[in-house]
Amino acid sequence: MSLRISIHCVGLFLLASLIPLPSFAAQPTVAELAADGVQRAEIIADSYSYTPDHLIVKANIPVELSLQSKTWLVPHSFVLKDAEAGLDIEQDIPAGKSVLIKFTPTRPGTFKFFCNKKLLFFKSHEDRGMKGTLEVTD
Ligand SMILES: [Cu+2]
């Protein structure tokens, strides 16, 4: 009886300690506006995620993103397209490399970015969760 109670307590403790984690992970990142008038942020590309996966920038101010691959072999990419918002990005991110991209979103909205890689008959990286949101504010 006492063993069962203590197991129950441990279970509750583990549950309580796990609950705050998802809310921290889900916090959007706001790109920092530097003195030179450019908004900068880093996004880490891994298999199969972007961190952060929700980035907030301001419209009509240049954005510079450093896309950093943390993978050893798997190539990824960063695709963000919306003609009406001035977004036309299709950038490969070779395994283990970093690339810089620059763009200026011309209007507010929420836009999806994703990885367009897919190996043979396997699920696409996007389908495996490699996608995120660019939120453009006024
Ligand atoms: Cu990918």
Image: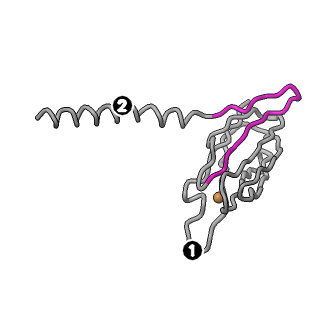
Q: Which residue occupies the foreground of this view, 138 or 99?
A: 99
Q: Residue at x 77, y 56 (%)?
A: 91
Image x and y of residue 115, in percent: 66, 57
Overall secondary structure of the magenta stretch?
A: strand
Q: Residue at x 79, y 28 (%)?
A: 33
Image x and y of residue 86, in percent: 80, 46
| 85 sits left or right of 70 in the view | right
In the rendered structure, does residue 123 fall within the stretch colored magenta? no
User: How many numbered marks appear?
Assistant: 2
Which residue in the structure is indicated by mark 1?
Answer: 121
Which residue in the structure is indicated by mark 2?
Answer: 16
Q: Quadrant of the C terminus?
A: top right
**Cα distance, mark 1 to mark 2?**
40 Å
Identify the disc placed on residue 46.
none
* Name of the residue lying farthest toward the right: 36
Q: Residues within 10 Å of mark 2 (few under 14, many from 20)?
A: few
Vertical order, 37 against 107 (above or below): above
Marks 1 and 2, the one that precedes in the sequence:
2
Disc 1 element = loop
Image x and y of residue 46, in percent: 63, 52
Q: Tell me the quarter of the picture where residue 58 sits.
A: top right
Question: Comparing marks 1 and 2, which lies closer to the viewer?
Answer: 2
Vertical order, 53 against 93 (above or below): above
Q: Which residue occupies the foreground of this view, 125 or 88?
A: 125
Amino acid type of the residue tagged 1 in the rendering: Phe
Amino acid type of the residue tagged 2 in the rendering: Ala
Disc 2 element = helix
Image x and y of residue 38, in percent: 84, 33
Q: Residue at x 82, y 41 (%)?
A: 104
Q: Residues within 10 Å of mark 1 (few under 14, many from 20)?
A: few
Q: Which residues are magenta?
A: 29-46
